[in-house]
Image: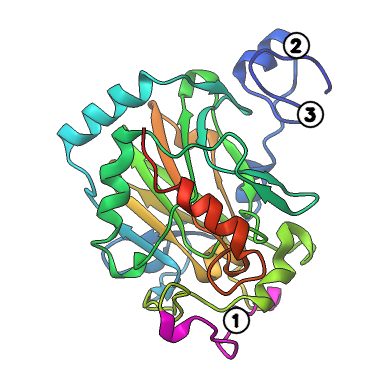
Amino acid sequence: MNTNRSCGCKSFRSCYICEKEFGIKNSDTAQDRVDGFQTIFKFCLEQELLFSDTDNAPQSDGIPFPGVKIFPEFISIEEEKQLIQDLDSLPWDASQSGRRKQNFGPKANFKKRKAKVGDFRGFPICTKFIQDRFASLPCLKDYKTVEQCSIEYRPETGSRIDPHIDDCWIWGERIVQLNLLSDSYLTCLPYLGDKTKYNLPDLSTFPKILDDEANVVFNPFDDANLRHDNAPSYSLKDTQKLLNGAVKIPLPRRSLLVFFGEPRYDWEHCILRQDISQRRIVIAYREFTPPYLPGGAHEDIGEEILNKAKEFW
């Protein structure tokens, strides 16, 4: 539907506001896909294993699902309160599917596969303590944030985000998210579509950053590994070997999620409308792929953007 909608929705995406205003029928393909699975798996935070969360499903031992690390209470209640106050003092932009956003990062043209600084001037000073705290986690060793996006979800607008894989041309292996204000779930669906979508073929040219145990196995900022041409890359799974079910990953309030490996590349992830019961804000962080880091083909523009990313205002 190509209507001019003030809510920010475009094309087939919709929220409660435009659905009511324009009589748009809610088409929630993500929920339909989840409902189509016989088994729903839930990720256990304590054991870091998957267990069936479906009534009458046969119970089994936990299933490994490497690629998910969750750190509860990454910030305190007091820090969260001040952070939300500071974020709300900054402008929010309308986004799609009932969301609002604040985006800080370089200008990336995904069709032409080109990046430039654009009007990027660093990140809000009120968020600096979060990035500083990344250094306390071994799995985020030398994580250099180049994009930071605040995303707001509200139940009254029917907020959600459709299944997707974060683009693999420019955004690196480790996706980091800080969950704020309310508990929620990240829902993962096995990706069975075109393996050329999301620039997935680029993975074969990149070294893996983390192993299944979340140990850093390649660090482009470490001189000893600067040109590690023989480092193993990530291999996409045979779709027949992926679990036949949806995976629900709990996102406790004030927890930090680090997403990598199989869940990052072989599964699409989304936020379902039904999993937003209160206002929720997530701050999402992305790093560069190796071509934009030291030793890479585009290290010059990468260095320019990384230098901007050191600034806080």
Q: Residue at x 61, y 61 (%)?
A: 300
Read off the residue under disc 3: 11
Q: Quadrant of the C terminus?
A: top left
Q: Residue furthest bottom?
A: 230
**Majority secondary structure in the magenta region:** loop
Q: Is the residue under label 3 in contact with that under label 1 (CB below 8 Å)?
A: no
Q: Is the residue under label 3 in contact with that under label 2 (CB below 8 Å)?
A: no
Read off the residue under disc 1: 233
* Label 2: which secondary element: helix
Q: Mark 2 vs mark 3: which is more N-terminal?
A: 3
Q: Note whether residue 164 is visible.
A: yes
Q: Quadrant of the N terminus?
A: top right
Q: Amino acid at mark 2?
A: Phe
Residue 22 is labelled as: 2
Which span is picked out in magenta? 223-240
Q: Residue at x 71, y 57 (%)?
A: 198
Q: Residue at x 40, y 48 (%)?
A: 310
Q: CA distance from mark 2 to mark 3?
A: 13 Å
Q: Mark 2 vs mark 1: which is more N-terminal?
A: 2
Q: Residue at x 36, y 42 (%)?
A: 179
